[in-house]
């Protein structure tokens, strides 16, 4: 027997700014498990998640083969690491796999023109072509040139001899998924329990939907295949017994809840949590058109439930080949979730083919009318490997795109400087660039006022007076409004300028811009780019909260009757909300100091009625005395997380905190301190 093949498999993420909420490298672990099944004595396989770890190991021991999982968030890094490999040792076989490639002949040609150091690309399901390639590699005496003698099924490569791209036929998918050994039960993933990565479990593969903006329906084929229930339970039990540094679990399925058995899996996860304490939280992508997802959410004790819609416009849905959950079922789920006092959410994508300014506004208005309490708005992205990328290429819908830096997806590793970009839709044949960008501040304020709850009660009051909250938000962002207080107006203008300036005509322009030493320094310090919504939410709260609240009040008064008669009520609500928000300016003693506010309306009782009572009926001329304070548990939690994310720029600290902790932690607890009514509530 010859020397074992040394294989490095990489599922890279950028950790230059520190570890994020990244997952176990389950994808490459499947390849390792399948390879070990067929080549148990011929292979020695090591898995990598972070680029510096890989670079350091490669310099110590050069492997025969390196494989990379290729996604939008690591594509540039993968390409530069491939260049790094070939510069050191040209005989190392470099393989890419994953959905981030345009599967057309032209798309594959473009990939190999720009990735000259990649030897093979394995599209779609990777296990079969990977072991086929290993077998061919062994038979070719580990000579890369000998491998390239005409197309090979299940893979793409550039044939230098004929100067063409060789595209093999698609392989049949693995229908009996248990044929792939479990990376957990075989111990392949054991080393990652010593990290802070989040365990990831896959219970099925495939997606019955064909949404053109998503790679799942195209790359995974439509037929569903399942890992056995016994195996799924065994993996969950194994994880619970070995996990050390996280209480989170993520299900990798595209549509968890699509099968009846998913109810049983959810019950098993909950029972496991009750017995072992793990997981405390289970995240998943829930099925799009299944009434049972509410039952699953209840079982998992995660009633905060998001059901993605993307759009409510029939033309848009037809263009992107999406079938939403029925509206009656969606409304029923929203009502049930809201009645339980939890958060009902959905996701909307701006810029899809056929979307107009008016149709997007109508979608958002309907969601507010239906009382969806968490509305996440995304910009439409074009991903390689999706049908939407083909639409853009052939000119259908006249999709015009630009590029922006993916949040935190950059870094410098030895001499490798890498920046990841996402391609966003900036205009179509039904929406201009100016129209599309005009929604950026609108989406920001939805996140700020509504989703994050900073001024949620105010929008609920506006709605009770017959005005859709979206109309109020549109009025807040109206360019013709010359009465915005100066400090707040400056922040608004900065937001709009950055929203336009974050887009580049090409990836090369983007990378050249951020490679400049001054810009890279600002990136590293968190002063450039980042998630704009969070950045400007805390810019308002830190720098001009009072002026912004004055803008909220003045905009309220700008409406005709009955609004101008309700000014006192509006002011009381804003004052109450302002007192509720923790002011992180100043010392800890100032933050932790309790305070009191007299308010003429019992806003606590209004909230507890789920805003069904008229606030005016909860009026008292003597007023209600409210106490705002930090309970000991919240005090300890805030101290710990403030230290963990301490940064000289307080905005960066608060942004990071908001990404990793419950947003409720940004609010004081409120106690009604009244002789006639003494009641305790949690905000």
Image: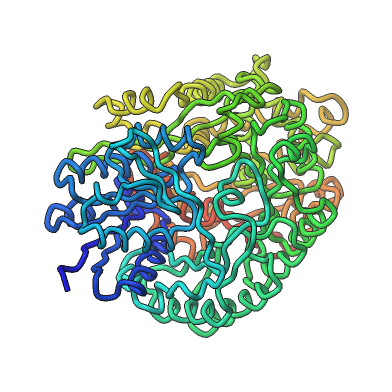
In this rendering, the count of numbered labels is 0
- The N terminus is located in which quarter? bottom left
Horizontally, is 85 left or right of 530 in the view?
Answer: left
Residue 91: % across, % down: 18, 49
Farthest bottom residue?
A: 275
Residue at image position (56%, 35%) is 389
Residue 26: % across, % down: 42, 64
Horizontally, is 253 left or right of 472 in the view?
Answer: left
Q: Is residue 543 visible?
A: yes
Residue 544: % across, % down: 52, 30
- The C terminus is located in which quarter? bottom right
> 677 or 384: which is nearer to us?
384
Residue at image position (87%, 27%) is 561
Residue at image position (49%, 77%) is 236
Asked which colour scheme the image uses, the reply is rainbow
> 278 or 225: which is nearer to us?
225
> 365 or 224: which is nearer to us?
224
Horizontally, is 285 left or right of 408 in the view?
Answer: right
Q: Is residue 672 visible?
A: no
Residue 463: quadrant of the picture: top right
> 549 or 281: which is nearer to us?
281
Residue 123 in the image: above or below residue 141 = above
Residue 512 in the image: above or below residue 111 = above
Farthest left residue?
A: 60
Residue 38: % across, % down: 35, 72
Residue 156: quadrant of the picture: top left
């Amino acid at each position: 027997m010859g020397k074992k093949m040394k294989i490095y498999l990489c599922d890279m993420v950028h950790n230059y700014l520190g570890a994020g909420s990244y997952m176990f490298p389950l994808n490459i672990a499947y390849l390792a498990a399948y390879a070990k099944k067929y080549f148990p004595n011929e292979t020695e396989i090591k898995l990598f998640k972070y680029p510096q770890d890989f670079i350091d190991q490669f310099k110590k021991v050069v492997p025969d083969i390196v494989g990379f999982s290729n996604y939008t968030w690591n594509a540039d890094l993968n390409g530069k690491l491939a260049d790094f490999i070939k510069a050191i040792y040209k005989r190392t076989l470099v393989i890419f796999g994953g959905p981030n490639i345009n599967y057309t002949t032209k798309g594959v040609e473009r990939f190999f023109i720009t990735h000259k150091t990649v030897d093979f690309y394995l599209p779609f399901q990777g296990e079969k072509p990977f072991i086929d390639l290993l077998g061919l590699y062994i038979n070719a005496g580990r000579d890369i040139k000998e491998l390239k003698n005409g197309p090979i099924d299940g893979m793409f490569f550039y044939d230098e001899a004929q100067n063409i791209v060789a595209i093999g036929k698609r392989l049949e998918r693995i229908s009996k998924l248990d044929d792939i050994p479990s990376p957990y039960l075989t111990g392949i993933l054991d080393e990652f329990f010593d990290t802070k990565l989040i365990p990831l479990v896959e219970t099925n593969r495939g997606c019955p939907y064909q949404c053109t903006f998503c790679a799942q329906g195209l790359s995974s084929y439509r037929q569903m295949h399942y890992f056995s229930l016994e195996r799924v339970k065994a993996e969950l039990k194994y994880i619970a017994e070995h996990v050390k540094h996280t209480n989170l679990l993520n299900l990798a399925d595209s549509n968890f809840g699509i099968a009846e058995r998913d109810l049983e899996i959810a019950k098993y996860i909950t029972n496991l949590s009750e017995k072992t304490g793990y997981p405390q939280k289970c995240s998943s992508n829930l099925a799009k058109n299944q009434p049972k997802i509410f039952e699953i959410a209840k079982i998992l004790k995660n009633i905060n439930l998001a059901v993605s819609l993307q759009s409510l416009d029939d033309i848009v849905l037809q263009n992107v080949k999406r079938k939403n959950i029925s509206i009656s079922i969606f409304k029923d789920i929203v009502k049930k979730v809201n009645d339980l006092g939890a958060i009902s959410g959905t996701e909307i994508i701006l810029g899809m083919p056929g979307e107009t300014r008016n149709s997007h506004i109508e979608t958002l208005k309907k969601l507010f009318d239906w009382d969806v309490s968490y509305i996440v708005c995304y910009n439409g992205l074009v991903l390689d490997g999706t049908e939407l990328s083909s639409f853009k290429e052939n000119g259908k819908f006249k999709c015009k795109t630009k590029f922006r830096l993916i949040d935190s997806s950059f870094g410098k590793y030895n001499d490798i400087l890498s920046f990841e970009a996402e391609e966003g839709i900036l205009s179509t044949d039904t929406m201009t660039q100016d129209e599309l960008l005009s929604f950026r501040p609108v989406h920001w304020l939805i996140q700020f006022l509504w989703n994050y709850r900073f001024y949620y009660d105010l929008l609920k009051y506006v709605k009770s007076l017959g005005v859709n909250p979206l109309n109020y938000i549109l009025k807040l962002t109206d360019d013709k409004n010359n009465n915005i207080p100066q400090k707040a107006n400056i922040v608004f203008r900065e937001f709009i300028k950055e929203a336009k300036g974050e887009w580049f005509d090409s990836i090369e322009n983007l990378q050249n811009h951020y490679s400049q030493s001054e810009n890279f320094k600002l990136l590293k310090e968190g002063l450039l780019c980042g998630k704009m919504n969070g950045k400007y939410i805390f810019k308002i709260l830190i720098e001009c909260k009072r002026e912004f609240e004055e803008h909220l009040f003045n905009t309220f008064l700008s409406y005709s009757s009955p609004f101008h008669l309700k000014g006192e009520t509006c002011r009381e609500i804003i004052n109450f909300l302002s007192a509720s928000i923790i002011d992180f300016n100043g010392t800890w003693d100032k933050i932790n100091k309790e305070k009191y506010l007299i308010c003429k309306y019992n806003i606590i009782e209004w909230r507890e009625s789920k805003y069904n009572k008229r606030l005016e009926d909860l009026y008292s001329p003597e007023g209600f005395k409210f106490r705002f304070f930090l309970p000991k548990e919240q005090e300890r939690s805030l101290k710990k997380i403030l230290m963990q994310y301490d940064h000289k720029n307080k905005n960066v600290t608060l942004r990071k905190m908001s990404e990793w902790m419950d947003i409720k932690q940004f609010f004081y607890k409120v106690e009604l301190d009244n002789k006639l009514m003494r009641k305790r509530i949690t905000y």
